[in-house]
Amino acid sequence: MMETVCFGALFPTANADVEDFQRLLARTSPPAGLEVVELPWPPGVAEGLADMPDDRLAAAAAGLGDPELLASALDGSAGRFDAVALAVTSAGFLRSAHDHARQLATLARVAGCRGTTTLRGFQDAVRHLGARRIGVASVYPAHFTDGFIAHLGETHAAVVRRVDANARTDRDLARWGDERIVDLVTRAAHPEAELVLLPETALHTDHLTAVLAEAAGVPVLTATQVTIWSLFRALGCTPVAAAAGPLFGADRGARPAAASSDDHVR
């Protein structure tokens, strides 16, 4: 029997996305469990997110990615996890590439294990699948999406279609229904896109994998998928799961090209 590995996920709203991660992990091999590490908002921020102007909202979300805050949240966790992820997409892409590298180094140093982020998962997944033209189904305000797309520039993939939903809080997004998620992905579809990216871990998307792919006409990479895949990849493992898209051994090669030569574990 294979030993179950233990993953950690830093997230600011406890239990907002655990169900989606657990649903995917329940059918993934090798076996793995996941624990949420609470990443606290500064006092008063979480309650006021919905009413903040965009610049303050961006600053609050970027603040969640402060390496010192990550270190504080993980304090005392050395040896607890086999790999740990910052599971807040915006906390990665609203900071610079230099800061993103500092985040990864901080996770590994403080937790004493391999570290990754949802943003790193998206970057590596696009490279791994060899996609050169992508669509972005963004739940965020437009200037948030700009930051995400700027970090995708490292993959050398071109964004041929983007949609911005201007959502405000992770708690609201956790309550989005299937129809609203499918509509966003449908509007992000483009005839030239090889993948559509859906970057938000608060969304409950695991049960929609096939539906989203049908709506887009190509595989849709969700934040749940790339975060879990990146955690396994940090350990040098290739996860396998039914109905989880091309990263998990299904639908590989639906339209994306072969894996690129720079695909590797970092």
Image (cartoon, rainbow, N blue to C red):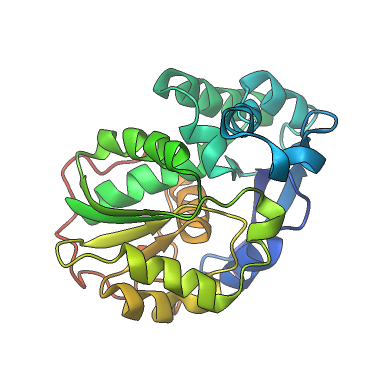
Q: Position of residue 197 (x, y in %)?
A: 37, 56
Q: Which residue is found at the position 55% from the left and 26% from the top?
A: 103
Question: Image check: 183 left or right of 191?
Answer: right
Q: Which residue is found at the position 63% from the left and 28% from the top?
A: 56
Q: Position of residue 176 (x, y in %)?
A: 62, 68
Question: Image check: 249 left or right of 192?
Answer: right
| Quadrant location, the C terminus | top left
Q: Quadrant of residue 43?
A: top right
Q: Position of residue 200 (x, y in %)?
A: 53, 53
Q: Is residue 202 above or below residue 9?
A: below
Q: Which residue is found at the position 47% from the left and 26% from the top?
A: 100
Question: Image check: 145 left or right of 6?
Answer: left
Q: Is residue 248 above or below residue 131?
A: below
Depth check, front residue: 258 or 57: 57
What number of labels is visible?
A: 0
Q: Position of residue 36 (x, y in %)?
A: 73, 49
Could one spot residue 218 in this view of the protein?
yes
Could one spot residue 246 in this view of the protein?
no
Depth check, front residue: 84 or 256: 256
Q: Is residue 70 above or below residue 82?
A: above
Q: Name the outermost residue toward the right.
A: 43
| Quadrant location, the N terminus | bottom right
Question: Image check: 11 left or right of 29?
Answer: right
